[in-house]
């Protein structure tokens, strides 16, 4: 049961932060290189 719970939480919790992080760092990284 522990493994199943962790597996379900990992994708759910990771999907939230990953989506928000990818959106911010994505454009930020592209703007950083050209600015430098």
Image (cartoon, grey):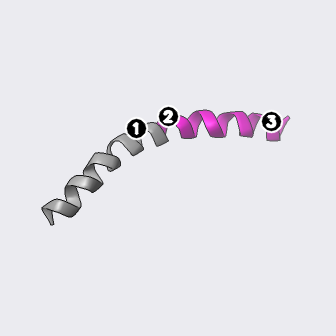
Disc 1, SS: helix
Give the mark toward the camera: 3 or 1. 1
Q: For mark 1, does the 10 Å Cα neighbourhood hold few (<14), some (14 to 19), or many (20 or more) residues?
A: few
> Where in the figure is residue 32, as x and y percent of width and height?
21, 59
The residue at which mark 1 appears reads as 20
Which residue is drawn at the image coordinates 60% and 33% (left, top)?
12
Question: Which label was assigned to residue 9?
Answer: none
Q: Which residues are magenta?
A: 1-17
Disc 3, SS: helix
Most common secondary structure along the magenta stretch: helix
| CA distance for labels 3 and 2 | 19 Å
Considering every residue shown, the one lying at the far right of the view is 1
Residue 29 in the magenta stretch? The answer is no
Tell me which corner region of the image, top left, top right, bottom left or bottom right, holds residue 15: top right
Tell me which corner region of the image, top left, top right, bottom left or bottom right, holds residue 2: top right
The residue at which mark 3 appears reads as 4
Q: Quadrant of the C terminus?
A: bottom left
> Where in the figure is residue 13, as x and y percent of width and height?
57, 36
Considering every residue shown, the one lying at the far bottom of the view is 36
Disc 2, SS: helix
Which residue is drawn at the image coordinates 81% and 41% (left, top)?
3
**Badge 2 vs badge 1, beta-carbon distance below 8 Å:** yes
Q: Of label 3 and label 1, which has the lower sequence position?
A: 3
Report the front residue among 31 and 14.
31
Q: Quadrant of the N terminus?
A: top right
Q: Of label 3 and label 2, which has the lower sequence position?
A: 3
**Badge 3 vs badge 1, beta-carbon distance below 8 Å:** no
From the viewer's perspective, is residue 3 above or below residue 29? above
| CA distance for labels 3 and 1 | 25 Å
The residue at which mark 2 appears reads as 16
Which residue is drawn at the image coordinates 66% and 35% (left, top)?
9
Considering every residue shown, the one lying at the far left of the view is 35
């Amino acid at each position: 049961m522990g493994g199943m719970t962790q597996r379900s939480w990992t994708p759910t919790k990771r999907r939230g932060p990953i989506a928000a992080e990818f959106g911010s760092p994505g454009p930020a990284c592209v703007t950083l290189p050209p600015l430098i």
